Amino acid sequence: MSNRVYIAGAGIISAIGNNITENLAALESGQAGMGEMKYLLSAHRGKIPVAEVKMDNAGLAALSGLPSHYSRTALLSAIAAKEALTNAAIPDFSTLRSGFISANTVGGMDKTENFFADFLAGPDKGRLRNVVHHECGAATEIVADLLGIKHHISTISTACSSSANAIFFGARLIRQGVLDVVVAGGTDALTKFTLNGFNTLMILDNRYCQPFDENRRGLNLGEGAGYIVMASERVAQTLPSAPYCTLSGYCNANDAYHQTASSPDGTGSYLAMKGALEKSGLSTGEIDYINLHGTGTQNNDIAEGTAIKLLFEGKYPPMSSTKSFTGHTLGASGGIEAVYSVLSIRHGLIYPNLRFETPMKELPFTPETTFKKDAAICNVLSNSFGFGGNCSSLVFSKV
Amino acid sequence: MYIRAAAGISPQSSFEQILADPVPVTGSRLQCMEPDYAKLIDPKMIRRMSRIIKMGVAAAIQCLEEAGERMPDAIIAGTAYGCLGDTEVFLQKMVENDEQLLTPTAFIQSTHNTVAAQIALLLKCHSYNNTFVHRGFSFENAMTDALSLLKDGQMKTVLAGGIDEITDTSHTILKRFGLYKKEPFPAGNIFQTGSKGTIAGEGASFFVLQSEASGNDYAQLTGMDTFYKPASGEEIRQHISAFLERQNINREDIDLVISGENGDMKNDAVYDMVYQTVLSGIAHIPFKHLSGEYPTASAFALWLAANILKAGKLPGGIQTKKTPVTVLIYNHYQHIYHSLYLLAAC
């Protein structure tokens, strides 16, 4: 038996839809998810656009089956993870050795930041139920219990590459025979903490972001969750329908340049993409689509673009940043983009990079601007790069 | 997997101090004895680092130096709370200034991957870099990742560690949850109180782990396992028995168990139960009177076990039939996260 890792299911909630069907419809119609803040109560409302999931916590609680006072991070996670597991329809799931590996960057901060405002008035002030789920692991634990997963649970936090690393780690545990099935990906809710943090770094766009554009101004923050269900070959053979694809390559590298900025030549990005390709045994010419990290910041896009220029040497596959739809969902982005990648392979899709106008003068290629159906997509490369120099790339391949 | 080197920053200054005269617990909190960082980290970098980053980076550097390794193939950190100090600074300013006129430094250093990232930056290490943040499994997850990478065979040397800090704010909040002792207890003795609550702890423990024996290792980590939310005492006993069986080891072959009693009645009842059943008749010592209780305290236990096996000496005046060769660690955090480590002397 091979030790290939199959993708059996996917689940997603983002600013462009609460499930796979809604996300695909928005991607096809070119409907971006950014807009004026509605659910996040920040002083920056009206000034900084964000890509919110279009539902309040009460609605998300009803969809997820969790109490509405839980952190939005956990509510989003539960909805996407449940969809992924239902979508995978794995026979006798409860008898298998299963794992839930979820990533996020700020855990229950959406509640903590409200607790903290009260707490500053006095050490006995603030409701404890608003801080009890502060830790990143709390959301994972809540959702693992909801899914009935006990054999392995873990939470990864490597900034914006978090959920790519969750998928990478899960795949290894399957390949080494430790687990049969893993639900892996990530979740993050918009918080004032992250919004203000990114604002101090002056990398937020006060208009809708334009990834890989010469005149890009920065990123839009988003929120959501995305998970894929990975299964061993033995489990894959029992599935009621064919798996989406396999996870054929992965690599985690570090830029080791600066805590928040990428090196100008994209060393970390280059090493991650190169390593993932080597692992998959594919040449650059065999990649049919790149789902870019493409945040829309000056720094990321030139570093990522330079690394692609160097690695692909003149033969550039179609590529796009779906953050032009979802905003940058931080710890969830690798999970959300993994879902888009496996859907790309299943349905032969290439997604547009919205609002692209002017090619970057340093780069010999431009992103895709139109939605393409029925493309022959066998191999997709998905990039996730983050603070702390954490760079990870995944390769998905048709079975 | 071999523990080539182990280094820790904890409420105890060194293993020698633990043997000779450990720092006794008095209040509801044990704080780390921090070293002279200037000897370990470039002073220009120290200036910008918060306390937890300094502790984590210093322990990591000390560990690498001891192993004589300059460039690990992977850097993996486990931390339940992450960089609390910087998180609080940014949160407080954000609330007080109504989201205006903020500066980025605290935000930049508040992300959970900062310690592992700073180690990479300091070493200029482009290799694998990961951070696990799953409460009482944060360190176990990091170790599982390390084991898995070494098993893959492409890597030879992995640096892995567990780090958590107490801040005044986190201590105040966790106290309100009723985690810590309210009644006074005899200095240094948290175990005989028969009361609720434990004492808070913190620490940074790092390990250089290698797949091949070097001839000069602290110990061999022959196995580890975790289990989550066991439903009954029976389930705990089954997990421990099954682990020992998989490791091909009899109860009689274990020279010493290091276990996670923390002074809280309910918490410690679990250990009483295993010592009356599945681990009966084996010499055992606690460790949380030395480290305090925190989600990654098991990293301190592993550091302690590695030192005991290397030195062949036991703390706390405990006698075993022979110099310990085989040591088991059993720890649980809040009865949710249970972990087992089996070590052998090299």
Image (spheres, rainbow, N blue to C red):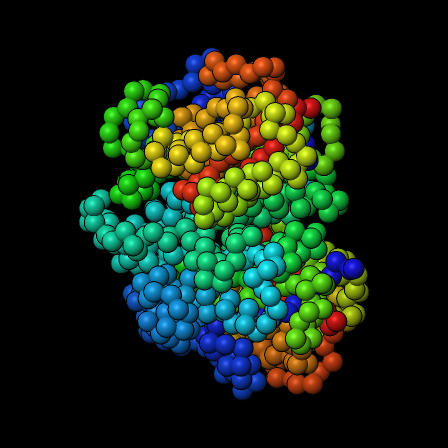
**Residue B121 visible in the displayed image:** no
Residue situated in front as seen by the camera: B247 or A7: B247
State the image coordinates of residue A227 (x, y, percent, origin top left). Answer: 55, 66
Residue at 71% over, 63% down: A234
Residue situated in front as seen by the camera: B125 or A151: A151
**Residue A99 visible in the displayed image:** yes
Q: Seen in the image, is A347 located left or right of residue A294?
A: right
Q: Is residue A232 above or below residue B8?
A: below
Q: How many marks?
A: 0
Residue at 34% over, 47% down: B88
Question: Quarter holding the N terminus of chain A?
Answer: bottom right
Q: Is residue A338 above or below residue A197?
A: below
State the image coordinates of residue A316 (x, y, percent, origin top left). Answer: 73, 72
State the image coordinates of residue B247 (x, y, percent, origin top left). Answer: 66, 36
Question: Quarter holding the C terminus of chain A?
Answer: bottom right
State the image coordinates of residue B17 (x, y, percent, origin top left). Answer: 47, 16
Residue at 53% over, 23% down: B281
Residue at 57% over, 85% down: A28
Q: Is residue A389 above or below residue B170?
A: below
Residue situated in front as seen by the camera: B278 or B243: B278
Residue situated in front as seen by the camera: A263 or A165: A165
Task: Report which quarter residue A337 is drawn in.
Answer: bottom right
